[in-house]
């Protein structure tokens, strides 16, 4: 049998695609791939932000939406006279002011420690990073038991050295600082890994040359290490600041904003006002003002860091 061969019809050649049509087809394909992400971004980020801005100018109450009225800037005027809002703002600011520099320094110290070429150093890298990959809810519950004033691990250790007992989470003067300590412990491992990557990019010959010139460890840190990770320092400072302003899970799980609102933050107040008290209009005003504050601080911080790193 003779093999079957496919004959082409020279009178009807295959249609050719022009470059313009191919470009249009590729454009539609690209939009098709991007469309799901754009839709999710719009539904879960852009649309809620627009609605929050709109509701902040209304008296929208969750249980009586049909009675919603436009009240202009009344919610924002109410914020200026709300002592609870001012206290929550102060608690958030205190948390940020302490956590950002302390956690950054702790992370840098840990990175310098685990950057040493020692046997078993990988175990310590994993141990320091482990709290980061653990759920914050679980970490908060664990530290609630550690901070237990009667039989918690913290007071048991402090009693050995003759200190305590301390009412870590039930004393209004200690609760926020207890959460700050726990938050620094939990989050330092993340910054440590970023610092570690930056430290390993610094050429070894710079340290060797400094050693030949007689530089000590402190001089190497100031003149080689810090300049070598300057951009990473700026990145970590901004990221840590933004994360610190969003403090919510720790006080929600450990203290419920108490005692006496000493651990209540802006994000916690947004949640409580909107979902517990159903005052969506006022809650939206807090959220919008919180966004503006974080945005301004981020811009100023970025500009300051940029001026000092150039």
Image (cartoon, grey):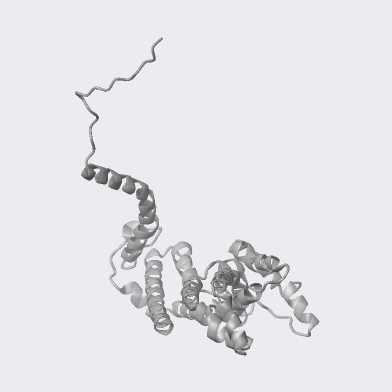
Q: Is residue 190 left or right of residue 35?
A: right
Q: Position of residue 15 (x, y in %)?
A: 23, 32
35 in relation to 244, above or below: above
Residue at x 35%, y 55% (from the top left corner):
42
Residue 214, can we see it?
yes
Q: Position of residue 114 (x, y in %)?
A: 65, 72
Q: Is residue 9 left or right of residue 259?
A: left
- Total numbered circles: 0
Residue at x 74%, y 77% (from the top left corner):
155
In the picture, residue 77 is in which quadrant? Answer: bottom left
Q: Is residue 305 left or right of residue 103?
A: left
Looking at this view, is 164 or 310 the one in front? 310
Q: Position of residue 85 (x, y in %)?
A: 44, 77
- List the single residue furthest toward the top: 1
Looking at this view, is 231 or 251 the one in front? 231
127 in relation to 27, above or below: below
């Amino acid at each position: 049998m003779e093999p079957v061969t496919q004959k082409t019809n020279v009178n009807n050649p295959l249609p050719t695609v022009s470059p313009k049509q191919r470009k249009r087809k590729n454009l539609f394909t690209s939009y098709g791939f991007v469309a799901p992400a754009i839709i999710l971004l719009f539904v879960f980020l852009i649309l809620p932000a627009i609605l929050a801005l709109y509701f902040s100018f209304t008296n929208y109450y969750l249980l009586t939406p049909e009675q919603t009225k436009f009240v202009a800037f009344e919610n924002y005027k109410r914020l200026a006279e709300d002592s609870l809002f001012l206290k929550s703002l102060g608690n958030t600011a205190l948390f940020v002011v302490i956590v950002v520099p302390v956690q950054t320094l702790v992370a840098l110290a840990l990175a310098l420690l685990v950057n040493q070429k020692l046997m078993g150093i990988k175990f310590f890298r994993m141990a320091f990073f482990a709290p980061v990959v653990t759920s914050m809810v679980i970490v908060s519950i664990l530290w609630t038991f550690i901070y237990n004033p009667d039989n918690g691990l913290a007071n048991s250790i402090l009693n050995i050295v003759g200190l305590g007992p301390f009412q870590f989470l039930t004393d209004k003067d200690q609760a926020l600082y207890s959460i700050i300590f726990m938050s620094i412990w939990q989050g330092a491992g993340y910054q440590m890994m970023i610092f570690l990557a930056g430290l390993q990019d610094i050429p070894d010959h710079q340290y060797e040359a400094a050693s030949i010139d007689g530089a000590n460890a402190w001089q190497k840190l100031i003149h080689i290490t810090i300049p070598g990770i300057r951009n990473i320092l700026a990145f970590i400072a901004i990221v840590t600041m933004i994360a610190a302003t969003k403090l919510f899970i720790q006080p929600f799980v450990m203290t419920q904003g108490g005692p006496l609102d000493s651990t209540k933050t802006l994000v916690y107040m947004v949640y409580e006002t909107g979902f517990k008290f159903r005052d969506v209009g006022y809650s939206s005003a807090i959220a919008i003002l919180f966004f503006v504050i974080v945005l301004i601080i981020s811009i100023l911080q970025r500009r300051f860091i940029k001026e000092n790193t150039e």
